[in-house]
Structure formats: structure tokens, C-alpha cells
Image: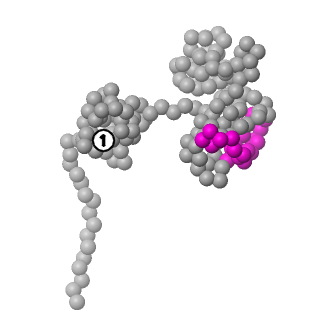
Amino acid sequence: MSTKSIFHTPLTIITDRPPINGMQVEHKTDLLSIDTRINYMHKMVWVKEEKAFYYLNSGTGAEEGDWLKYETVRSKIFAYDARVAYEKDDAVYIGGVVYIAKESVAIGEDPVSTPSKWLQIAGGGGSSAQFRIDFTNTNSVSISTPKTNPHISVYVGNELVEANVLRRSDTDFDVSFHKNVTGFIIV
């Protein structure tokens, strides 16, 4: 009886295309040289240099305008803290008014004294602000709100549903579901 020996060796592929490892490339310009035969609408590719996902929005992917950066929106709203520097799209509240940073904001540049760097999105003028937090394919959502003991309405799709709500403090809550769902929460 003969015995065969099996040797395992890594396969090395040399190509003139960008290295795609789990759908990633080194530089944004590498997106343009991905073989257009393997591109499809909404294909997601990680660009290491930018530390961001890009997706194919139109065309074949051979032109820069075909690819768009995948943006996410933060769902937490924090009390403004003058000791903190904020990034673009950070949301804060101060005096019952909610603001979103339009650009990077240095320490001490509050929404009232530097309105050019902030966008007021809710509150002010005696109105009571409501907040909407969208979620996609998840079984839990953490909420941090400027409202104390708020009423929380949970929607799966467009249907109001009951959900498990765990109160961590007067303004912080965890909402959980028995399975992954998509919807929104109104606070």
C-alpha cells in the first residue's frame, strides 16, 4: 500500500490590478482600475488610505464620479461640553436646542458663539424637539437624548411596535428586539 504525502503551500497571485482582499484597495484611485466585469451597483469596497467604504453608485466604476463615499450618521446627541473638540456631524444640545457640527469644531467653539460651524436642527423658539433615530438590521439600539424621561416610540418598518426598553439613566436607554429588524425610534 502506497502512502501519498500532501503538501500545502500558499497561492501567490501577481496582478496589475489593485489588491482586493475582502473587497479592499489601498487608495481611492485604485477603485477606477477594478475590473469592470466584476462591478455591480452598490458594490462596497474598503479604501485603506481613507479608512472608509465607497460604493458603486452609477456607471461601471471606471470613472471617479461612479464611486461615492459611504457615510454614516451618528445617532447619539450629547450635552455640549466646552472641553471637547467635535467632528463634522457630531450632534450636541445646549439650552434645549440641538445642533450638528458642519465641520470640525475646536474646544470652546460652542453653537451660540460660533454659529457658522453649527447647524441648528431642533428646539429653540419654545418648541419641543423630537428626535428620530434610524436603525437597520439590528437587534439593539442605544439612545442618548437631551430629554429627561422621554416618551419612546419604536417603529419597525412603519408600524408602531412594543419593544424592550432598558433605562440606564434619565436620558440613556437601550432598546432591544428578539430578532434583527429595520425601523426608527422617535424620542
| Residue located farthest toward the front when viewing the structure as drawn | 159
| 121 displayed left or right of 33 | right
**Residue 82 left/right relative to 168:** left
Image coordinates for residue 161, horizontal then vertical, percent:
69, 44
Give me the residue at 25% from left, 36% from top. 33
**Which residue corresponds to mark 1?**
39
The relative height of residue 5 versus residue 57 in the rendered view (above or below) is below
Is residue 81 within the magenta segment? Answer: no
Question: What is the quadrant of the C terminus in the image?
Answer: top right
Q: Magenta segment range?
A: 156-176
Q: Main secondary structure of the magenta part?
A: strand
Disc 1 is placed on an element classified as loop
* Residue at the (26%, 33%) spot, across then down: 62
Q: Position of residue 148 (x, y in %)?
A: 78, 31
Q: Is residue 55 left or right of residue 59?
A: right
Q: Badge 1 local density, few (<14 within 10 Å), some, or many (20+)?
A: some
Q: Residue at x 28, y 44 (%)?
A: 38
Residue shown at the point (73%, 13%) measured from the top left: 125
In this picture, is 7 found above or below 28? below
> How many badges with numbers are in the image?
1
Is residue 160 within the magenta segment? Answer: yes
- The spot of residue 64 in percent (x, y) is 31, 28
Is residue 30 toward the left or the right of residue 89 in the image? left
Examine the rendering and report whether any part of residue 35 can be seen: yes
The quadrant where residue 106 appears: top right
Q: Which amino acid does the dot numbered 1 rest on?
A: Asn
| Residue 95 visible in the picture | no
Quadrant where the N terminus sits is bottom left
